[in-house]
Each structure stands twice: as C-alpha cells, then as structure tokens.
Image (cartoon, grey):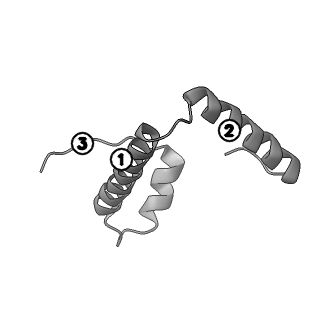
Amino acid sequence: MVSITLAVPEKLKREMEKFPEMNWSAIAREAIKHRLEMLRKFRAFARESAFTEEDAILLGRKVNKALAKRYPNETRG
C-alpha cells in the first residue's frame, strides 16, 4: 500500500482530535473509493449521453438560482 499526505484545515483537525477512536485513514480511503466510484459512473453516463458540458452548466445555473430563491437565508459553505 502507498501513503499519501492529506492537508486539512486546523479547525477540522481539532474536531477530528475529539474522536481519537476513529481510524481517519480508513475513513479517508472509503471516501476516496466512494468518490472514484461516482466518477466512474458519471463518466460512463456521460459517454452515453447527448447532454453537453454547456447543457450541464446551464442546468446547474438554473438549479443554483432555484435553490437560492427557495433557501434565501442559507449561507454558502
């Protein structure tokens, strides 16, 4: 197995330290594995789709506007 170094913000690290029983390396591995699976599925879907990148950007903008109207008091994270 190879090792990677992961940088996290100080605040996140302090929160993680509150749970020393957690195996953060295993959690990071699972999160990376899950993201890769999602990306593989997305790539396969995109390969079979007539939906263009421009279509996706336009749809994303519409969704963002609709969400901003629906939840006007939410802050961005």
- Tell me the kind of residue under disc 3: Ile
Q: Earlier in the sequence, mark 1 or mark 2?
A: 1
> For residue 23, what is the image quadrant?
bottom left
Which x, y percent locates residue 67? Answer: 79, 49
- Residue identified by numbered label 2: 60
Q: Earlier in the sequence, mark 3 or mark 2?
A: 3
The Cα–Cα distance between marks 1 and 2, rounded to whole angstroms, is 20 Å
- Residue identified by numbered label 1: 40
Quick one: which residue is furthest to the bottom in this view? 21
Which x, y percent locates residue 16? Answer: 44, 60
Q: Is residue 38 above or below residue 54?
A: below
Q: Is residue 4 above or below residue 70?
A: above
The Cα–Cα distance between marks 3 and 2, rounded to whole angstroms, is 33 Å
- Tell me the kind of residue under disc 1: Arg
Instruction: Residue at 68%, 38% (x, y): give it.
Output: 60
- Tell me the kind of residue under disc 2: Gly
Q: Nearer the viewer, residue 77 or 59?
A: 59
Q: Earlier in the sequence, mark 1 or mark 3?
A: 3
In the image, is 44 to the left or to the right of 77? Answer: left
- Residue identified by numbered label 3: 4
10 Å crowding of disc 2: few (<14), some (14-19), many (20+) = few
In the image, is 4 to the left or to the right of 61? Answer: left
10 Å crowding of disc 3: few (<14), some (14-19), many (20+) = few
**Mark 2 element type:** helix
**Mark 1 element type:** helix
Which x, y percent locates residue 50? Answer: 53, 35
The Cα–Cα distance between marks 1 and 3, rounded to whole angstroms, is 22 Å
Instruction: Residue at 35%, 62% (x, y): give it.
Output: 27
